[in-house]
Amino acid sequence: MNADIANVISNGLVTGCIYALIGVGFVVVFRATGVVSFAQGAFMVLGALIFAGLARAGLGLAVGLPVMLVVMLVIGGVIYRLVFARIAGAEAFVASIATVGLGIVLEVIALLIWGPEVIAVPQLFNFRSRVHVVGELNFSALNLFVMGLTVVAFVVIVVGLNRTPVGLRMRAVANNPQLAAYSGVRVVRTSMIAWGIGGLTAGLAGVLYLLGSQPDPVTVYSLGLAAFPAILLGGLDSIPGSLVGGILIGLLQAAIGVFVGGEWQDVGAYCVLLAVLLLRPQGIFGSAEIGRL
Amino acid sequence: MTGEMTMPPSQVQTAPARTRPSPRTLPGGAAGGAVFVLVVVVTALAGGQYAVYTGTLIGIYALVTVSQEWIIGRAGLVSLGSAAIMAVGAYVTARLSTTSWSVFPIPLVVAMIFGAVVGLLIGVPGLRFRGLYLMLTTLALQFIVAFAGQKYQGVENQSGFVVNPPHWGSLDLGSPRALFIITCVVLGLVLLALRGIYGGAAGRIWNAMRQDEAAASVLGVNLVRWKLTAFIGSSALTALGGSLYAYQAGLVSYGTFSLDLSLTLLVMVFIGGLGTLVGPILGAAVIVLLPNGIERLSGAFAGIPQVADWLSLHEATVANGIYGLLLLLVLLFERDGIYGLVRRLGSAAAGQWHRRVRRGAVQ
Amino acid sequence: MTDPRLGVDGVVVAFGGLRAVDEVSFAVQPGETFGIIGPNGAGKTTLLNSVSGLVPLRTGSISLDSTAMHGLRPHQRAALGVGRTFQAAEVFNDFRVRDYMLLGRLFAQQTSVIGAALRLPGVRRAEKSERVAVENLLDRHGLADVAGVVLKELPYGLRKLVDILRALAGRPRVLLLDEPTSGTATSDRLALRDVLLEAGRDGMTTVVVDHDVQFVSELCGRVLVVNFGQQIGTGTPAEVLQRPDVRAAFMGAD
């Protein structure tokens, strides 16, 4: 295998995993409440900063990561309850615009508390240890960690949605909120959980991005918007779609980075977004009704 | 359980009255116009350097927010790419200003045409479906235009294209005061044109679409056509705003027309209030004056240096946070924006007054 | 008999696995006032929505004066002459009465945006003459004094009347009335009935969907009864209402 192609695969998979995590939270929120969240990037920033604070305080991955996830779960749920519960059900479109405002507010809060500098986090990984796979293809320990956690997150979410009572309620709300309410599902609480999951997965994506690069908060924030091509490609309401879309866009951007030039990466992804809108607006896995949303 | 229970919720019979803000029929246009002319004339004659500069800026942003309100408040669509379309107008103006086509107002007209074409190109894929897809398409536009702008500027124009001041033959129109007057005249003409449009059949059609798309289509409204019309028109006017911006700034570079600017414009429209022409102008004025207000606030805290320093250090961030918070608050609590709030307070005060008068009459 | 004004043939509308309208066929002749009755949730409104083009057909066909319409979008059907009122009078709550009436005459209007922007004299004249026509129409029905009132501030029954006048103002080839009496008082019903009888005398072809059997019986020569999306029978109101299965359907629902 050619070294360039090996690079594309390993970089693309890692970036793709981060897109997939941003995307899966987006999809869960969208399915449960119909809101297109432009605040995923802000949740990423919060997750990354909270984790970095915990890590600097001496908590390692084993403690810091779960604590961050719980905090983000709570933040997501509380924000839904305080801000969106009033309007999300009736006016998903207005609520979607409101997430733009929410994203700005959260980002500004983070900037005012932690400052705009590169997020400092102690070295938690030995980056040099590389695992050889085949030919030129090898992954760093960090890469494997990112991919492993992404797989775990998807397994937990898919199993959780399909096998647990909470998941079943969430699906009922996603299919028909009114009917779910009639049948005794507490729509607000279920939607809170969905937003909590949205916050949690975005936070996880933020941390994984933080571990791989040395970003400042604004860079993390803009990654939340950069995930839209992946989300749309997979299908706004499809959980497997968010994984496939994320990986495909990750690989595409990595390929552009290696063969064309890094500056073309974002614009390439957005051209895919336009192409998807023109040719298959529901994405690869999305349901056809989404196209009429 | 029977048929209609499980119908998709968007159909006519179940559609509740949308609670999107309701446009009013145009209130006292003559009075509003007189106030507008008065403010412009006084500022142009007696305003200091700062007033003229700020006035121009408010005028330019007001032009853009009024055009964005066309799609948001009338057609019920939201664009995240208004800055990108401003950029198109600004680039066109910058390039024409150094050619023989620089005679005023040729660059403005050409900028409008380019804006309309971009609106058409983006509107066709973006408007086949409901509002969400236009948001995503215009988000893409925002990134693509920034990238194209960067490439277009290249290395030799890295800091941007220089814009030569507008002129009529040998008459230079580039002084701050002349630019202020040009901006206000253009804004005034645009307001008149929009009043004409909204007062006629087209205004009623958009009003119907905004209240209930499905029901409007049953009345005979071709939804795609009318959304596209609004988007093309609004894009042409947004590019016109970009053209004026280019003259005012004197230098055009892609960095100015960022997603942040698009979001700020969105905030201006929403906090000003939808469904009126006055609302977006108010919104533009408030947001342009806000950083200045924060500066004064930090001045007011001069006695407490910690607060004053913190405020002046974080001025831009704080302003940004206030924009976001205002957007959130307006969408959650006061959908008619500042203008709606003013009207409501005004009518409440009038009610109080009437009650007092009545009480007085009884006693 | 000539081609019907409105022909509905074997129409099936399904949401998921549920058939909201199941193999319904009927034909309305020019100038006829045709009723569709059935208990709540029988699929009456869905049937109207399928004629308007708001819900897709699974199978079947719909024609207007023998032109097939079922492939057309709602606005195209409206342009062909399908007029309609709305069950919920709240749909266009924010309009003033006169502006709502103007909306009913969409096809007669000058909609040039550039013309309006430039305030061309032709456009302004056309708008003015439209406004005069609407004021006259309102005057004729004794509504001149509410012309400037916003719809949501009108009594419910009056809103329903305005909605019907709005639809009539567009001079449709077939007028679909969706539950004109729902939420109205007896006095409103008499006014609605008179307007519809007059329209019928003028040759208007009308399809009335309503749950008020008496109202429909007074207006319509023929009625169709639907229940659970299926048609139970067609005939004169007197005939149909005699049938035991029809009576059972209504008793069961109420």
Image (cartoon, coloured by chain):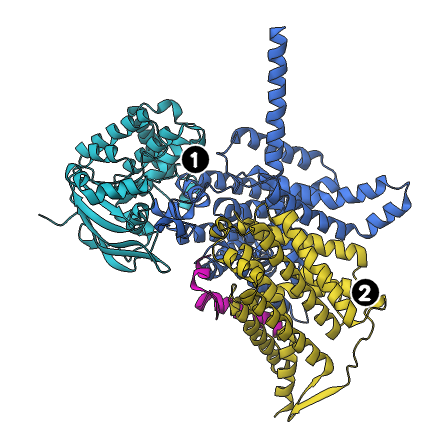
Q: Position of residue A179 (x, y in %)?
A: 47, 51
Give above or below for B251 relative to C240: below
Q: Which residues are magenta?
A: A265-293
Which secondary structure, mark 1? loop
The extreme top residue here reads B363
Q: Which chain is blue?
A: B
The vertical placement of B187 against A252, above or below, is above
Colour seen for chain C: cyan
Q: Nearer the viewer, residue A103 or A46?
A: A46
Q: In terms of depth relative to the viewer, which is nearer, A275 or B245?
A: A275
Q: Is residue C196 left or right of residue A290?
A: left
Residue A101 at x, y percent in the picture? 65, 51
Q: Which chain is rendered yellow in the image?
A: A
Q: Is residue C23 left or right of residue B244?
A: left
Subunit of label 2? A
Q: Chain of mark 1?
A: C
Report the amino acid beneath label 2: Leu
Image side of residue C14 versus residue B279, left or right: left
- Based on the displayed image, in which of its 4 quarters is residue A205 positioned? bottom right
Q: Which numbered circle lies on residue C95?
A: 1
Q: Is residue B305 left or right of residue B56?
A: right
The residue depicted at 46 percent of the width and 60 percent of the height is A290
Residue drawn at x 78%, y 68% is A63
Residue C92 coordinates in the image, percent (x, y): 42, 38
Where is A43 relative to B35, above or below?
below
Mark linked to residue A54 = 2
Residue A275 within the magenta-colored segment of the rendering = yes
